[in-house]
Image: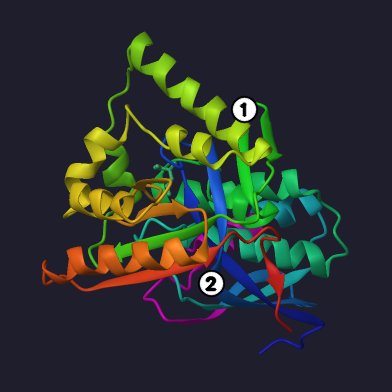
Amino acid sequence: MTDKMKSIKVFAPATVANLSCGFDVLGCCLDTVGDEMMISITPTPGIRITKIEGADLPLETHKNVAGVAVEALLDAYNNPTIGVDIEIYKKIKAGSGIGSSAASSAGAVWAVNHLLGTPFSNQELVAFAMEGERLASGNAHADNVAPALLGGFTLVRSYTPLDVIKLHTPQDLVMTVIHPQIEVKTSDSRSVIKEKVTLKEAIHQWGNVGGLIAGLYTEDYELIGRSLEDVIIEPLRSILIPEFENVKKAAMSQGALGCGISGSGPSIFALSKSMDTATKVATAIREVYNSTGLDFDIHVSTINNQGIKIIS
Ligand code: HSE
């Protein structure tokens, strides 16, 4: 045991990436589901994962997404006298498609940065947290870590150089997410995507990305709904998700604005204009899944405009 200098406990939120049309660039942050992490700055150099509860994940720093993300931060901070102890209380299941690895990576770097007196900007924290995503999926995508760190809806305008924008979040939006208890690894789910898209598909998709962002800023809920459409990834990935089409039909029949795959799946999200509609959507999609015999979780959440929060 090392002597603790300073500790904080944070809530590291789940996130919904892609939002149908924005593969690898769009995401948003949830309120009601997330991990908890206790982060301590210690006088003993090195990064130690001292406890993990709720999941069977590696304690070795180099194999743990929080460990490598903090390592990237400490490399940039360049103060070899500093050590970090990390306790992780997982509430988000691995392979669920609601940003489990991102929550750990983002929560850890945000908390360390806070304890160090915020030497880094949020943009820089996104880059460190992306190292956790690289370890988890082989690809350093930012569409989960950005909304976890910045809150609300986020856009990755560019990866080279990294340019992450926090978007406007209309107050009335509520997310319903169903998580079927089958594990779909992001790396597997990425392997079914084709490398090339046609110009026709690209035109369709970037029209929707623009439409979704315009809809968020003008709080035009119909436009948001029309823009939640994915002609490139969803047709390929949805076959990995039991009852995807029936869940979508059920969600839309209850008045959801739109419905699609959450991140790389298997979770499915539906976005609605009110808590009342989102709750009806939850009931309808629960009925669809009850018939499958599969275990599942359902989350209903407002959009978390703050991102990571200090609990204690
Ligand atoms: N954009 C990533 C993907 C998100 O769809 O593979 C993973 O949660």
Q: Secondary structure at mark 1?
A: strand
Q: Secondary structure at mark 2?
A: strand
**Residue shown at the point (34%, 47%) measured from the top left:** 261
Magenta stretch, residue numbers = 50-71
Residue 179 is labelled as none
Q: Quadrant of residue 285?
A: bottom left
Residue 32 is labelled as 2
**Does the Cβ of the disc 1 residue fall within 8 Å of ligand 1?**
no
- From the top left corner, tell me how far across and down residue 189 is, in percent: 28, 44
- From the top left corner, tell me how far across and down residue 148 is, in percent: 61, 56
Q: Amino acid at mark 1?
A: Ser
Side of 44 relative to 188 (left or right) = right
Q: Nearer the viewer, residue 276 or 87?
A: 276
**Ligand 1 rendered quadrant:** top left
Q: Which dot, 2 or 1, sits closer to the camera?
A: 2
Tell whether position 53 is magenta: yes
Residue wearing tag 1: 158
Mark 1 residue crowding within 10 angstroms, few (<14) / some (14–19) / many (20+): few
Side of 184 relative to 21 (left or right) = left
